[in-house]
Image (cartoon, helix red, strand yellow):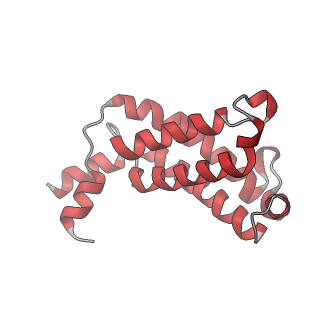
Amino acid sequence: MNNSMLKNLLTTDAGYGALLLRVPVGLIFVAHGAQKLFGWFGGYGLEGTGGWMESIGLAPGVLMAFLAGAAEFFGGLALIAGFLTRPAAFALSIAMLVAIFSVHFANGLFMSNNGYEFGLALLAASASLMFSGAGKASVDEFLAAKLK
């Protein structure tokens, strides 16, 4: 990757609003990823989550659980730090699209019916960060300034 491409990936004109979006959304993703990967916070870990994923047609289940958990856990950490925010937000957007259409869409919008409203909110936040970048108080902003 050349210097110009890296600079474009890291540069952002977003302000502190992106920080206010990055941190809570990143925390939510970290917690959900930790449930899948490690069984923390009442989660089922790779084996349990993998078995469930296999049962809904996402096979091989353990691999799918690992990919989803890694995207959420490490992508969430990246959002919190504001490090490689755009690629992290892209991966998280894909994870949310899969979750919405493979699990929640048939249940309608509302969470009370296991619907897609929460996934849609996380998708919107991730897509927003993918386009805006990390904003202020981010590793991306620091690195972009070093590349100037």
Q: Position of residue 147 (x, y in %)?
A: 18, 58
Would you say residue 132 is visible in this rendering?
A: yes
Residue 133 lies left or right of residue 112; in this view the side is: left
Residue 42 lies left or right of residue 127; in this view the side is: right
Residue 117 lies left or right of residue 124; in this view the side is: right
Residue at 64%, 53% (x, y): give it. 98
Q: Quadrant of residue 63?
A: bottom right
In the picture as drawn, the residue positioned furthest to the left comes out as 148
Image quadrant for the N terminus?
Answer: bottom left
Would you say residue 83 is visible in this rendering?
A: no
Considering only vertical position in the picture, is 128 above or below 4? above
Q: Position of residue 79 (x, y in %)?
A: 47, 46
Residue at 78%, 67% (x, y): give it. 61
Q: Position of residue 124 (x, y in %)?
A: 50, 37
Q: Quadrant of residue 8?
A: bottom left
Image quadrant for the C terminus?
Answer: bottom left
Residue at 54%, 41% (x, y): give it. 123
Q: Quadrant of residue 113?
A: top right
Q: How many marks?
A: 0
Considering only vertical position in the picture, is 32 above or below 109? below
Q: Position of residue 52 (x, y in %)?
A: 84, 58
Considering only vertical position in the picture, is 2 above or below 106? below
Q: Nearer the viewer, residue 105 or 46?
A: 105
Q: Nearer the viewer, residue 121 or 100?
A: 100
